[in-house]
Image: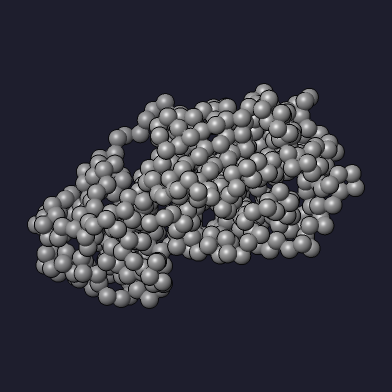
């Protein structure tokens, strides 16, 4: 798809489809007023007759052969008084839904003069351009790699977005939005790839390929022998039951000054999770290919950095393993010594994500990080607590937590903070080791983060539990690409200007 930015007046923009917005309550945007004047008041008449309601994300296609456009797509944007970025994105998704299967070969979208409420960082034209770019990329996504019969080729090939200008700031905002959408789609591709293809070695190959594709990315992969030599026994313990060996994947992006400390992203990369000896129920187990959603999001964020080249240093570390039952598999009751020297009694082999992450969190100390953010499809308890709308956030630093929450609000990729109080740590007490890997049913998301916090004491750290947000089930089954928007917004806010 060819996306471009233009400041050309819509009256002189010849296109197969012009897209304008009409609110349910509020003032019409200037672009809509101009379009209606050219159409001789047709939109006003349709609104008066009830054909156009303005309800958010409602759409109506209006023939316009007597205008510079073959047709006009009118999208409802709700009420001016309470239109948030999430509402704006729903309207954009509705537009994409109409365009991607429609007859138009090209389209012009005039939506940057639609009002948003909130702080300037949320309501600015740059923010709207960012959301438009990201949402269009995201909504035009499809995954047909393994279908023998490919879908018909989409007619739409070019989308032009109208803005007040095409200067550097607006252009960069639009391009960052497009790049973020592309990063999300890469994350989705990785997540949707079947587990007989996507295993730890394959993931490592993708990281090596990224280094070939982008000169700004440097990749290093540690195999099982190297990890054993270092003492990364918990990652190895998780992978013992699989024919596919584990890997520790390190990608570095160095766009800042050499003296600048790097921001570190750590991703859980369990490419398939049977639960190991603590075997999961069979129903829905196919979705455990998404248990590498944290690592997929790290890949997506790194792709955005490689495309946009911000002035910041970022290191990505992915702990990849496949959790399978086997004669060699780790047993409940086994005790393993971690890279940190602390010992863990493994009471449940299905609590494996924290085991691969704890060694990775110890490993990243070597980079002297500015902050460390790990992301993982870690606990079903997070889905019970927050559903599928918000990512769980836990942190040992209030400032970092606040910045991540704010990034989530700006992007609509929202998170909610849970406590990380010392009172919960006692649930991890073990009679035989320094700790056990589960804390019982109460506060499962919190005790999982408490476990990780024991390996992140020497730096500012946050944990994102994306178990409820990394993929969709049912008819819309598939990876969501979250939390790439949150991560990118956070990292860009720290990039040097």
Name the one closer to the observer, 89 or 285.
89
Residue 415's x, y, as percent?
A: 56, 60
The colour scheme used here is one colour
118 w.r.t. 406: above or below:
below
User: Dividing the picture into quarters, in which one does residue 90 lie?
Assistant: bottom left
Give the vertical position of 404 relative to 157 (above or below): below
| The residue positioned farthest toward the left in the image shown | 66
Residue at the extreme right: 431
Tell me if residue 249 comes above or below residue 480 in the rendering: above
- Give coordinates of residue 183: x percent, y percent: 43, 44
Residue under the image location 39 percent in, 59 percent down: 89
Q: Quadrant of residue 169?
A: bottom left
Instruction: State the quadrant of the N terminus.
Output: top left
- How many tags in the picture? 0
Q: Nearer the viewer, residue 457 or 450?
A: 457
Compared across the picture, whether 60 is left or right of 336 comes to left
The residue closer to the viewer here, 27 or 395, is 395
Q: Is residue 20 visible?
A: yes
Residue 179 in the image: state x and y as whole percent. Answer: 37, 46
The structure residue drawn at horizontal position 54% and vertical position 28%, both measured from the top left corner, is: 202
Residue 489 visible, this orientation: no
Quadrant housing the C terminus: bottom left
Q: Is residue 6 left or right of residue 411?
A: left
Q: Nearer the viewer, residue 73 or 379?
A: 379
Residue 306 x/y as whole percent: 41, 41
Residue at screen point 71% across, 48% down: 455
Q: Residue at x 37, y 30 (%)?
A: 150
């Amino acid at each position: 798809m060819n996306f471009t930015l233009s400041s050309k007046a819509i009256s002189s923009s010849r296109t197969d489809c012009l897209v304008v917005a009409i609110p349910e309550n509020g003032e019409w945007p200037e672009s809509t007023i101009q379009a209606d004047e050219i159409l001789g008041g047709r939109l006003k008449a349709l609104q008066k007759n009830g054909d156009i309601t303005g309800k958010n994300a409602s759409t109506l296609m209006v023939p316009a052969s007597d205008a510079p456009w073959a047709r006009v797509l009118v999208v409802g944007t709700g009420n001016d008084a309470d239109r948030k970025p999430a509402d704006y994105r729903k309207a954009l998704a509705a537009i994409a839904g109409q365009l991607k299967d429609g007859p138009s070969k090209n389209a012009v979208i005039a939506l940057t003069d639609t009002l948003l409420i909130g702080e300037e960082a949320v309501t600015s034209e740059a923010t709207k351009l960012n959301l438009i770019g990201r949402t269009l990329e995201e909504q035009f996504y499809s995954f047909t790699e393994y279908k023998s019969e490919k879908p018909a080729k989409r007619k739409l090939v070019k989308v032009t977005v109208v803005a007040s200008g095409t200067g550097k700031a607006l252009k960069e905002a639009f391009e960052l939005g497009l790049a973020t959408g592309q990063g999300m789609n890469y994350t989705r591709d990785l997540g949707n790839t079947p587990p007989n293809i996507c295993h730890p070695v394959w993931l490592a190959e993708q990281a090596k390929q990224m280094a070939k594709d982008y000169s700004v990315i440097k990749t290093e992969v540690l195999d099982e022998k190297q990890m054993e030599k270092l003492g990364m026994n918990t990652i190895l313990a998780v992978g013992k039951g699989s024919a596919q060996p584990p890997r520790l994947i390190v990608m570095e992006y160095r766009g800042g000054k050499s003296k600048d400390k790097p921001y570190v992203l750590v991703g859980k990369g369990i490419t398939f999770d049977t639960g190991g000896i603590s075997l999961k129920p069979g129903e829905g187990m196919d979705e455990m290919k998404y248990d590498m959603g944290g690592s997929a999001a790290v890949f997506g964020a790194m792709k955005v950095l490689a495309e946009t080249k911000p002035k910041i240093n970022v290191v990505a570390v992915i702990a990849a393993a496949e959790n399978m039952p086997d004669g060699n598999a780790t047993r409940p009751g086994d005790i393993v010594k971690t890279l940190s020297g602390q010992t863990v009694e493994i009471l449940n082999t299905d609590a494996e994500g924290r085991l691969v992450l704890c060694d990775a969190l110890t490993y990243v100390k070597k980079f002297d990080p500015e902050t460390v953010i790990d992301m993982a499809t870690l606990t079903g308890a997070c889905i019970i607590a927050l559903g599928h709308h918000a990512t769980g956030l836990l942190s040992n630093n209030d400032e970092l937590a606040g910045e991540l929450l704010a990034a989530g609000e700006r992007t609509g990729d929202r998170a909610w903070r849970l406590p990380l109080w010392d009172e919960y740590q006692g649930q991890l007490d073990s009679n035989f080791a320094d700790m056990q890997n589960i804390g019982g049913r109460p506060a499962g998301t919190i005790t999982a983060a408490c476990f990780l916090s024991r390996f992140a004491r020497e730096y500012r750290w946050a944990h994102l539990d994306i178990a409820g947000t990394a993929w969709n089930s049912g008819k819309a089954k598939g990876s969501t690409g979250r939390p790439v928007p949150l991560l990118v917004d956070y990292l860009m806010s720290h990039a040097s200007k």
